[in-house]
Image (cartoon, coloured by chain):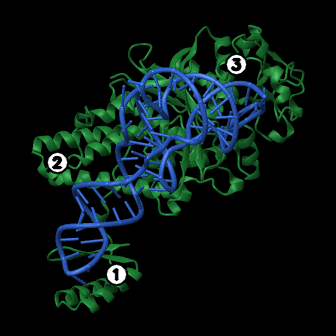
RNA sequence: GGCGAGGUAGCAAAGUGGUAAUGCACUGGUCUGCAAAACCGGUAUGCGCGGGUUCAAUUCCCGCCCUCGCCUCCA
């Protein structure tokens, strides 16, 4: 079953097949490591992760590259503010990022190149662009890409006549005073000449000391690790313009390739119906949510619970819903285990089995919410206790095939959570049990109420009872 | 102003030219001394608004309203 995915460039759904017939090569724009990534950033990375998992589950190996932007205005500014060297500063945030990725069950990219580590590659690309007449050095030592030299500029973002429309832009007046050297307002920096406030963060180049422009790193690293031509390029929807537009221009002008064949963009996450922003106080990191008692798995569930091309509204209620949904899956899995299935399939599941519909839906433009719906529909009509062992094993294997495709790890069912019950609580519970057995309902009920107010719930069964944290 | 995405039950969110998946919440039942948990049910005559096409539209077409994103370095 081939995966189809919407392509931003052609605005059409396209079948995803590796152009070399073997490995699907794809590049994702990674984070700028100057602070903790927020859940909006992670919506994109999680969507890319599901994409990779579905491709691999479908039987196609992948080569996944995701860069780290470890030199730009923000990293330079904030590292100096923190009194740290750029590399020390970005290493710290890179490690934080990796820890979050691990918590969210993101598969590590095959290569995670950093901009600073690929300066020669970027310089080489600039030299080629200058030789071919697509770039020019300004008097101050900066180098710019000449947008007018590339006829196809604007195809991705559909802004063919950008310069004419600049007057309508609200930010048109905010021309960067440092970029007055440009021939045209539309031209963008490939190399930025050293400035006093860069501190010690500059490198030598044929045009003098300075640092690479942001757009260039992705082009250079994609070329290095994927070649001139590769299958899929991905990022947040905000990167379409100018970042990806510029990447296409640089890459196509410095090689003879077509660059990425397919563009996969993930729509932004909204919070409480609006944009996430620090000033509104609704910008959350994974750590913020964990502090409030939510697990990374629950966050992941919320992030994939909307289609990647539709805006998704993040709320705490949706986190609570995710918790219950995961519990429902976990309880079903437990029931299968009680029917004789192993905790996890002995080997990686190879087919969706009874969840074929969910798998099919998932392969139609990565419709995760549709797939989740189909999974629950199958769940609701399957009674583990009434299955033969073979049937149970097929359901179990299919379920895990789908969970692996979505990168969902099941929590421990809440009633199985081992908790330390304080002696005082255990004592109250025991007294209530005695009262109950003595049919002294008023005493039993008041003790149960007391326990509840202390944060503990009692779950009775025939011959015993369980104490659970509320 | 230009380009793009979206408006479906209390919340979230799929989907289809023939009468609306799924999760949460709510609610009825079974069970229980009563609860909780679990299990079995129920819950949008309706899919932003107004026209049109059609035997039939939430789904196609036209117009309008609203929300969100981008328009030079924000995933």
Give the Cα distance between marks 1 and 2. 34 Å
Determine contact: label 1, label 3, CB under 8 Å. Answer: no
Could you tell which of marks 1 and 3 lies nearer the N-terminus? Answer: 3
> Is residue A337 among the parts visible in the rendering?
yes
For the C terminus of chain A, give its image quadrant: bottom left
* Left or right for A106, reference A417: right
Q: Nearer the viewer, mark 1 or mark 3?
A: 3
- Chain painted blue: B
Q: Where is residue A469 drawn, in percent x and y?
A: 36, 73
- Chain painted green: A
Q: Quadrant of residue A49?
A: top left
Q: Write down the residue under mark 2.
A: A341
Per the image, label 1 sits on a secondary structure element best described as loop
Per the image, label 3 sits on a secondary structure element best described as loop
**Number of marks in picture:** 3
| Residue depicted at x 32% and y 33% | A359
Closer to us: B65 or A309: B65
Q: Which label belongs to residue A422?
A: 1
Tags 1 and 2 on a common chain: yes
Marked residue chain, label 1 = A
Q: Write down the residue under mark 3.
A: A154
> Is residue A104 among the parts visible in the rendering?
no
| Other-residue count near label 3 (Cα within 10 Å), few / some / many at <14 / 14–19 / ≥20 | many
Q: Where is residue A220 drawn, in percent x and y?
A: 63, 22
* Left or right for A252, reference A368: right
């Amino acid at each position: 079953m081939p995966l189809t995915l919407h392509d931003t460039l052609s605005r059409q759904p396209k079948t995803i097949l590796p152009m070399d017939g073997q490995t699907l090569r794809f590049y994702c724009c990674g984070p700028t490591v100057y602070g903790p990534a927020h859940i909006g950033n992670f919506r994109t990375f999680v969507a890319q992760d599901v994409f990779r998992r579905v491709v691999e589950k479908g039987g196609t190996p992948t080569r996944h590259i995701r860069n780290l932007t470890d030199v730009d205005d923000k990293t330079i500014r904030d590292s100096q503010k923190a009194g740290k060297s750029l590399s020390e500063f970005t290493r710290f945030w890179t490690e934080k990022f990796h820890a979050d990725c691990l918590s969210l069950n993101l598969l590590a990219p095959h290569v995670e190149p950093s901009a600073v580590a690929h300066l020669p590659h970027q310089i080489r690309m600039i030299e080629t662009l200058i030789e071919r007449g697509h770039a020019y050095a300004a008097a101050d030592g900066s180098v710019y890409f000449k947008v007018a030299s590339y006829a196809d500029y604007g195809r991705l973002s559909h802004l063919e006549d950008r310069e004419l429309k600049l007057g309508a832009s609200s930010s048109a007046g905010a021309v960067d005073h440092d970029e007055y050297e440009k021939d045209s307002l539309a031209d963008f920096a490939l190399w930025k000449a050293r400035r006093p406030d860069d501190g010690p963060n500059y490198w030598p180049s044929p045009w003098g000391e300075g640092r690479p422009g942001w757009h260039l790193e992705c082009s250079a690293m994609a070329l290095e690790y994927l070649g001139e031509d590769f299958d899929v390029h991905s990022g947040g929807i905000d990167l379409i313009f100018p970042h990806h537009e510029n990447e296409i221009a640089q890459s196509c002008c410095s090689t003879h390739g077509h660059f990425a064949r397919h563009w996969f963009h993930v729509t932004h996450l909204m919070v409480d119906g609006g944009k996430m922003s620090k000033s509104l106080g609704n910008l959350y990191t994974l750590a913020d949510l964990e502090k409030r008692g939510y697990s990374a798995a629950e966050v992941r569930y919320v992030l994939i619970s909307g289609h990647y091309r539709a805006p998704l509204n993040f709320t705490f209620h949706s986190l609570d819903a995710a918790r219950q949904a995961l519990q429902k899956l976990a309880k079903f899995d437990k029931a299968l285990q009680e029917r004789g299935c192993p905790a996890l399939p002995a080997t990686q599941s190879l087919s969706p089995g009874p969840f074929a519909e969910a798998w099919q839906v998932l392969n139609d433009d990565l419709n995760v919410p549709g797939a989740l719906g189909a999974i629950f529909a199958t769940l609701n009509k399957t009674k583990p206790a009434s299955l033969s062992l073979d049937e149970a094993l097929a359901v179990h294997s299919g379920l895990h095939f789908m969970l692996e495709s979505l990168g969902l790890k099941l929590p421990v069912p809440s009633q199985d959570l081992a908790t330390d019950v304080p002696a005082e609580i255990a004592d109250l519970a025991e007294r209530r049990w005695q009262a109950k057995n003595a049919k002294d309902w008023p005493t039993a009920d008041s003790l149960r109420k007391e326990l509840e107010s202390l944060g503990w719930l009692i779950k009775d069964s025939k011959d015993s009872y369980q104490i659970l944290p509320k």
